[in-house]
Image (cartoon, coloured by chain):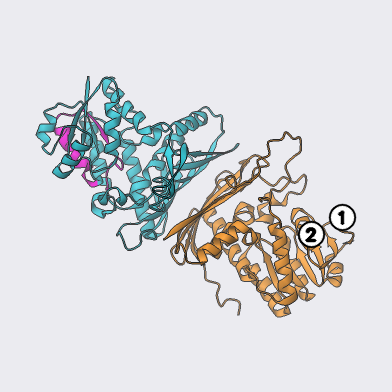
């Protein structure tokens, strides 16, 4: 049996990952550590599981792998703690870090200690995206020129307050939503970003938070592909779902439009007098956690690495620099 | 009043349908060659003018539906003849020419009405009205999408000649540049990347632009000549402080035609949901009322110039890879 636990329930994805871990045959869910004893109480009750705020107690369970879901700025210290305790496999929530220095430290630590660190980019496991990537790889859709994309969402402080805390989250919408599509386009084009232009504003929820709530970026890749990403928290609180991720890939033969979260039922509810979307598509988190478990079992690096996380952090930092200066930033 | 239509391509014939719905008399058509103008002249039981001068001598209003690069000379000629002028978009290939055209018309005491037709599409007009009502607050981010196929004319395809059409940013994206200004006001910065700037030999073209408005609104404009005919998709999202408006031409199409056909798609794609009155006809009618009775219109000559200015900046940005600042034009005309 492979033993997996979660470090911190600060990020709401932990609530999904615990169920993902529990449903994998051959994987033993060992429980979680959260330095915040309030959260330990809340989530151990909610998920009827063992949790502790004592790191030693947690590592005494000898996890083969941990999934880190702390606040963004705590990723480095969580990684260091896990490695010091002898953990060899880590899946770390995105963004890998809130600063370039932290991200680089994580990469060099994992390299020198030969740690399998998977950055949590679940969209690489989205069934519609995998299907399109497969056709693109086989050349069915032609040569890629550019992408238009949106990863818009509701303001995440609806679920967790720290998402809008500059220090804990590392920023606002650019920090939260730029990395998924950046990673997908790197993965699809097999090329690296060489320049970034970005603009941001606080037009949504103005006055409620001190981070940017809107952002648009244009990435240019070494192979001459380019991409726009809207990463704004522009979805109203009563939107039928949390947000979404979609892109249009333009090739020499036309274009393909992909909406990763389109597989919904439209549900009308008397109790809330509103329409909600009920997602029935495949769970990409499940695919990602299964890959993490498989990499532990097969003693190999996961298909997404710490370096993938670092590359996305570089783009986010360049976007902040560009938004501040108004100029394109070369990488 | 008597109207003469210059240019008999897809816009000339579309405008003619609009004029037929007014009490104006179509005195005739003028095209590059007489045979080109003959089918339309026959359809509307009117004549062909060999030269623009001949048309100007018989018309009160001249409706210019020619390729973009011809607009400045023809508008100046019409202004000199003191005719009321309607000019297809883009007004000109550069904003300096646009300003000169505006000045020439002012001096001649004639109106210059620029056919930025998207302002007459009911879905676009309704969204603008909704934003203006203040119900949903100030726009924060806007997405405007417009993509079809490359205009395919059997010969002399001026659309594909950047010298004559200005390319996709000038010919297609200009609709959305103008609409963005209409909804969120003047633009400060333009940043664009475009497929044909990076790969001139590409069989498709696609442009992505980020506009920063003076008021801080961010607008993302997508334009494409990339889809297989007969596809033409348009759409927008206007995300505001207290709400949002979403439109997608595919989602709102009331008819889905799945009938087999051997018919080819038209040379130049025009968007449009079935309506009692075509937006092109609404546009001609409003322009005609403005000319006859001085009624207010929703698009000024200066709007036409400013749309061109944004498109010029987008072309420059696509070429240089750098953001381009927009120079305020207020006061320049006087």
Categorize mark 2 by other alpha carbons within 10 Å: few (<14), some (14-19), many (20+). Answer: many
Residue B142 in view (yes/no)? no
Element at badge 1? helix
Does residue A194 appear to the left or right of B308 in the view shown?
left
Q: Quadrant of the C terminus of chain B?
A: bottom right
Q: What is the chain identity of the residue bearing mark 1?
A: B
Task: Classify the position of the N terminus of chain B by image quarter.
Answer: bottom right
- Badge 2 sits on which subunit? B
Q: Colour of chain B?
A: orange
Q: With respect to residue B54, does A103 lie above or below?
A: above
Q: Is residue B253 above or below residue A138?
A: below
> What numbered label is drawn on residue B16?
2
Whether residue B248 appears in this view of the structure is yes
Q: Is B327 on the left or on the right of A236, as rendered?
A: right
Where is residue B91 shown, x and y percent of the image?
67, 64
- Counting labels gives 2
> Is residue A12 highlighted in magenta?
no
Residue range of the region highlighted in magenta in the rendering: A73-98
Image position of B14 with respect to B109: above or below: above
> Which of the chains is cyan?
A
Percent across and percent down for residue B113 are 69, 69
């Amino acid at each position: 049996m492979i033993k997996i636990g979660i470090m911190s329930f600060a990020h709401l994805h932990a609530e999904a990952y615990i169920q993902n871990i529990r449903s994998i045959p051959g994987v033993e869910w060992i429980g979680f550590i959260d330095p915040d004893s309030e959260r330990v109480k809340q989530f151990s009750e909610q998920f009827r599981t063992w949790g502790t705020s004592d790191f030693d107690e947690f590592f005494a369970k000898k996890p083969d792998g941990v999934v880190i879901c702390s606040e963004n700025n705590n990723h480095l210290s969580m990684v260091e703690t896990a490695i010091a305790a002898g953990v060899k496999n880590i899946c770390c929530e995105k963004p890998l870090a809130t600063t370039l220095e932290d991200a680089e430290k994580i990469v060099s630590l994992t390299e020198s200690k030969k740690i399998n660190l998977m950055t949590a980019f679940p969209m690489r496991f989205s069934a519609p995206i995998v299907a399109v990537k497969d056709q693109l790889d086989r050349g069915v859709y032609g040569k890629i020129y550019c992408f238009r994309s949106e990863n818009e969402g509701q303001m995440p402080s609806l679920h967790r307050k720290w998402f809008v805390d500059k220090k804990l989250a590392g920023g606002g919408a650019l920090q939260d939503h730029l990395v998924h599509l950046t990673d997908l386009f790197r993965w699809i084009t097999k090329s690296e970003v060489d320049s970034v232009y970005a603009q941001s504003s606080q037009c949504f929820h103005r006055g409620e938070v001190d981070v940017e709530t809107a952002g648009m970026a244009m990435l240019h890749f070494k192979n001459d592909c380019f991409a726009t990403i809207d990463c704004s928290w522009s979805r109203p609180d009563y939107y039928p779902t949390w947000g979404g991720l979609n892109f249009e890939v333009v090739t020499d033969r036309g274009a393909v439009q992909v909406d990763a979260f389109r597989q919904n039922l439209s549900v009308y509810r008397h109790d809330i007098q509103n329409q909600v979307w009920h997602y029935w598509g495949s769970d990409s988190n499940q695919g990602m956690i299964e890959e993490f478990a498989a990499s532990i079992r097969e003693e190999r690096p996961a298909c997404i690495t710490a370096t993938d996380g670092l590359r996305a952090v570089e783009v986010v930092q360049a976007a902040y620099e560009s938004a501040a200066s108004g100029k394109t930033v070369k990488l | 009043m008597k109207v003469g239509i210059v240019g008999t391509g897809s816009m000339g014939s579309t405008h003619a349908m609009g004029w037929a719905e007014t009490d104006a008399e179509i005195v005739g058509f003028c095209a590059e060659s007489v045979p080109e103008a003959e089918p339309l002249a026959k359809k509307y039981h009117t004549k062909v003018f060999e030269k623009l001068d001949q048309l100007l001598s018989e018309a009160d209003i001249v409706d210019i539906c020619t390729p973009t690069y011809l607009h400045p000379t023809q508008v100046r000629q019409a202004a000199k003849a003191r005719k009321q002028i309607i000019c297809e978009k883009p007004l000109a290939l550069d904003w300096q020419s646009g300003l000169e055209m505006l000045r020439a018309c002012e001096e001649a005491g004639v109106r210059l009405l620029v056919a930025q037709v998207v302002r007459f599409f009911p879905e676009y007009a309704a969204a603008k009205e909704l934003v203006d009502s203040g119900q949903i607050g100030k726009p924060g981010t806007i997405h405007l999408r417009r993509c079809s196929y490359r205009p395919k004319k059997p010969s002399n395809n001026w659309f594909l000649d950047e010298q004559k059409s200005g390319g996709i940013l000038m010919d297609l994206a200009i609709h959305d540049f103008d609409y963005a200004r209409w909804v969120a006001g003047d633009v400060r910065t333009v940043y664009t990347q475009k497929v044909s700037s990076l790969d001139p030999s590409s069989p498709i073209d696609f442009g992505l632009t980020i506009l920063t408005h003076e008021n801080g609104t961010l607008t993302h404009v997508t334009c494409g000549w990339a889809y297989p005919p007969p596809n033409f998709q348009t759409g927008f999202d206007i995300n505001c402080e207290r709400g949002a408006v979403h439109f997608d031409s595919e989602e709102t199409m009331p008819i889905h035609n799945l009938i087999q056909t051997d018919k080819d798609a038209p040379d130049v794609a025009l968007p449009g949901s079935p309506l009692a009155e075509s937006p092109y006809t609404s546009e001609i009618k409003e322009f005609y009322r403005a000319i006859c009775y001085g009624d207010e219109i929703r698009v000024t000559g200066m709007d036409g110039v400013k749309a061109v200015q944004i498109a010029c900046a987008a072309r420059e940005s696509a070429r240089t890879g750098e953001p381009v600042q927009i120079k305020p034009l207020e006061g320049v005309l006087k």
